[in-house]
Image: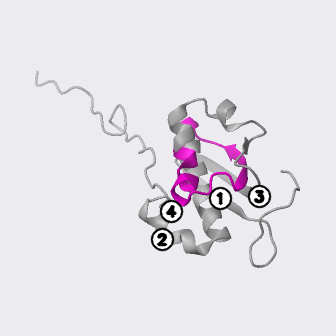
Amino acid sequence: MTHAATVTDADGRPIQTVGRRKEAIVRVRLLPGTGQFTLNGRTIEEYFPNKVHQQLIREPFVILEKGEQYDVVGLLHGGGVSGQAGALRLAIARALIEVEPDDRPALKKAGFLTRDPRVTERKKYGLKKARKAPQYSKR
């Protein structure tokens, strides 16, 4: 992570938050800047070529109209592309609240502060997948 001038909390520590979704874990640091994303050393366009994911990630900034105020440095690992995008959005929303607690109602109303609890259901014995049973044959 870079050691530029950081956005700090009340104790003078840099704003760092964690977002999780499915198996993905994302750590985010918020820096004052121009709206650039550095995700594992790459830009948002390189890391998330899918425009839907890019839009999903930028939503917290769009709702608060703060898109050009902060740079985001993110460390992502685990999970897949979609899970990482969701985790990043949660981490960004949490970071924005630490910067400006007054923004909480807007982000909460949009549902950006809820950790999506849906995870893969485990496979059960006697079944082919979590719920798919072998074909039933009467004779």
* Amino acid type assigned to the residue bearing label 2 in the image: Pro
Q: Which mark is drawn over residue 113?
A: 4
Give residue 42's position: percent from left, percent from top: 75, 36
The type of residue carrying mark 4 is Leu
- Mark 2 crowdedness (10 Å alpha carbons): few <14, some 14-19, many ≥20: few
Residue that appears at 46% across and 54% down: 116
- Judge left or right: residue 129 versus residue 107: left
Range of the magenta residues?
56-83
Q: Which residue is mark 1?
A: 18
Classify the position of the C terminus by image quarter: top left
Find numbered disc 3 in the image and state the secondary structure of the residue it sits on: strand
Q: Report the residue marked by disc 3.
A: 32
Kindly identify which residue carries mark 2. 105
Which residue is located at x 67 percent, y 38 percent? 44
**Residue 75 lies in the magenta stretch:** yes
**Is the Cβ of the residue at disc 3 closer than 8 Å to that at disc 4?**
no
Circle 3 or circle 1, nearest the eye: 3
Pointers 4 and 1 in contact (C-beta within 8 Å): no
Quadrant of residue 3 in the image?
A: bottom right
Q: Earlier in the sequence, mark 4 or mark 1?
A: 1
Q: Who comes first in sequence, dot 2 or dot 3?
A: 3
Is 104 situated above or below 50?
below
Q: Nearer the viewer, mark 1 or mark 2?
A: 2
Label 4 vs label 1: CA separation? 12 Å
